[in-house]
């Protein structure tokens, strides 16, 4: 049995009020107690002038692109054109995806991230649940034409069979990629299979206006892209389809992450708010900024009751994998309470992927996934001290 008491200038449990000079007691890798210094029972280690936070949760990324030195293309480019660059990059096949994933995990840990929801295109090997960062692999499915549904479904099933379930953690999920790459029948089958196996689902939705145009009219830049690649199926999408049609299917999954949602309507937000026990929205702030989409209605979505978590998306559209940088971007560009922003990058992310019983807050019984961010000795508001600073995590 190993016990350690960590004390810091501030402890931010996230599910409770911040504690000045708080102590977190850790035993065998789990949090035993959280409280004031007088409550410490065991050897005390003083971390100094830092805010001790739960490990950050990246609710959406694609680690296979972690080798990229900079985002692909140019800021403000159209999404379909950027996807052409991603496909070309993948086809060059000059990268080792296992090495890129390992590099992404290391980078994430170094910037305070301890849990990652990753979109995976290859089978996961080895048991990853004991390592930090912990990784949930959402196995990506792509199959737009009716003819591709069967093989795309079989492929995902095969990859996801390398499934690890331990310590009440599900480390496998399904990711029907997006409405412009996934036939409605394939989406239904994946959601049904996820329900059967109690697995989470993640899907990119309403990311661009071109996507809404494809759904509504079967036309536009995404149709051109699909035709170019020999993937177009004129019967795949019924004209007049909306994101709500897809949200209704996703609502049947045990847990669903809706990625981006840049162009969702108020009716869609209200639906997500009603279904918040299982559905969450994942906002990728700097990727949203990279594509120069219209302003993200974050405050309105939160006010409607939507659970919003944060993701970095990949290094193909973002300079790094830092959730702390995403939180600071939100603080600089939106009028949201600092505590709410910290929650989005921790507990809300854990809730979104179904890991809130084990990580996401400094709570007795959860894993002691902790991140220490330096602060001024006189800092009186720990959330502000973290968000309005450039300090990087010193310990994870
Ligand atoms: Zn993505």
Image (spheres, rainbow, N blue to C red):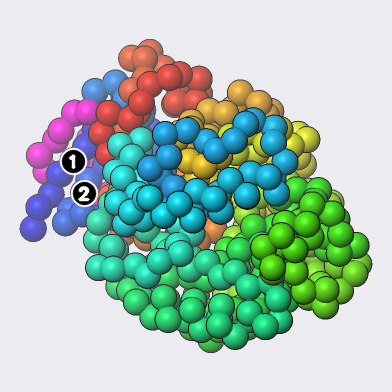
> Can you see residue 192?
no
Q: Quadrant of residue 392?
A: top left
Q: Within the magenta stretch, is there residue 325?
A: no
Q: Nearer the viewer, residue 12 or 244?
A: 244
Q: Nearer the viewer, residue 151 or 39?
A: 151
Residue beneath the point at 91% across and 67% down: 240
Residue beneath the point at 59% across and 69% down: 142
How busy is the neighbourhood of tag 2: few (under 14 within 10 Å), some, or many (20 plus)? Answer: many
Residue 107 location (% of width, % of height): 33, 40
Q: Quadrant of the N terminus?
A: bottom left
- Identify the mark at residue 5; answer none if there is no mark: 1
Q: Quadrant of the C terminus?
A: top left
Q: CA distance from mark 2 to mark 1?
A: 6 Å
Residue beneath the point at 51% across and 84% down: 154
Q: From which residue to which does the magenta span run? A: 31-47
- Identify the mark at residue 26; answer none if there is no mark: 2
Residue 394 location (% of width, % of height): 27, 28
Disc 2 vs disc 1: Cβ atoms closer than 8 Å?
yes
């Amino acid at each position: 049995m190993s016990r350690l008491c960590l004390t810091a200038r501030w402890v931010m449990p996230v599910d409770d009020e911040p504690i000045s000079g708080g102590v977190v007691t850790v035993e065998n890798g789990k949090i035993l107690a959280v409280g004031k210094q007088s409550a410490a029972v065991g050897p005390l280690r003083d971390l100094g002038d830092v805010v001790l936070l739960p490990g950050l949760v990246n609710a959406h990324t694609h680690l296979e692109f972690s080798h990229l030195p900079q985002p692909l293309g140019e800021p403000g480019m159209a999404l379909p054109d950027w996807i052409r660059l991603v496909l070309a990059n993948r086809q060059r096949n000059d990268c080792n995806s296992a090495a890129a994933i390992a590099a992404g995990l290391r980078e994430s840990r170094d910037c305070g991230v301890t849990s990652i929801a990753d979109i995976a295109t290859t089978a996961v090997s080895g048991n990853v649940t004991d390592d930090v960062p912990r990784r949930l692999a959402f196995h990506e499915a792509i199959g737009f034409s009716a003819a591709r549904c069967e093989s795309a479904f079989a492929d995902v099933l095969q990859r996801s069979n390398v499934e690890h379930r331990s310590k009440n953690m599900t480390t496998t999920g399904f990711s029907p990629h997006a409405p412009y790459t996934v036939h409605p029948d394939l989406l239904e089958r994946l959601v049904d299979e996820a329900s059967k196996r109690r697995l989470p689902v993640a899907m990119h939705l309403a990311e661009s206006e071109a996507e809404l145009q494809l759904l509504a009219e079967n036309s536009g830049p995404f149709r051109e892209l699909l035709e170019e690649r020999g993937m177009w199926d004129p019967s795949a999408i019924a004209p007049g389809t909306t994101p709500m049609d897809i949200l209704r299917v996703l609502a049947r999954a045990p847990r669903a992450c809706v990625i981006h949602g840049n162009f969702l309507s108020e009716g869609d937000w209200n639906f997500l708010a009603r279904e918040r026990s299982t559905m969450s929205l994942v906002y990728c702030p700097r990727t949203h900024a990279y594509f120069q989409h219209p302003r993200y209605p974050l405050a309105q979505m939160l006010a409607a009751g939507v659970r919003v978590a944060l993701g970095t998306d990949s290094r193909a559209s973002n300079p790094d994998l830092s959730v702390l940088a995403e939180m600071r971007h939100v603080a600089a560009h939106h009028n949201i309470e600092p505590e709410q922003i910290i929650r989005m990058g921790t507990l809300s992310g854990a809730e979104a992927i179904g890991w809130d019983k084990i990580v996401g807050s400094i709570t007795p019984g959860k894993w002691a996934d902790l991140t220490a961010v330096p602060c001024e000795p006189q800092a009186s508001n720990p959330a502000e001290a973290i968000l309005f600073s450039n300090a990087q995590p010193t310990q994870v």
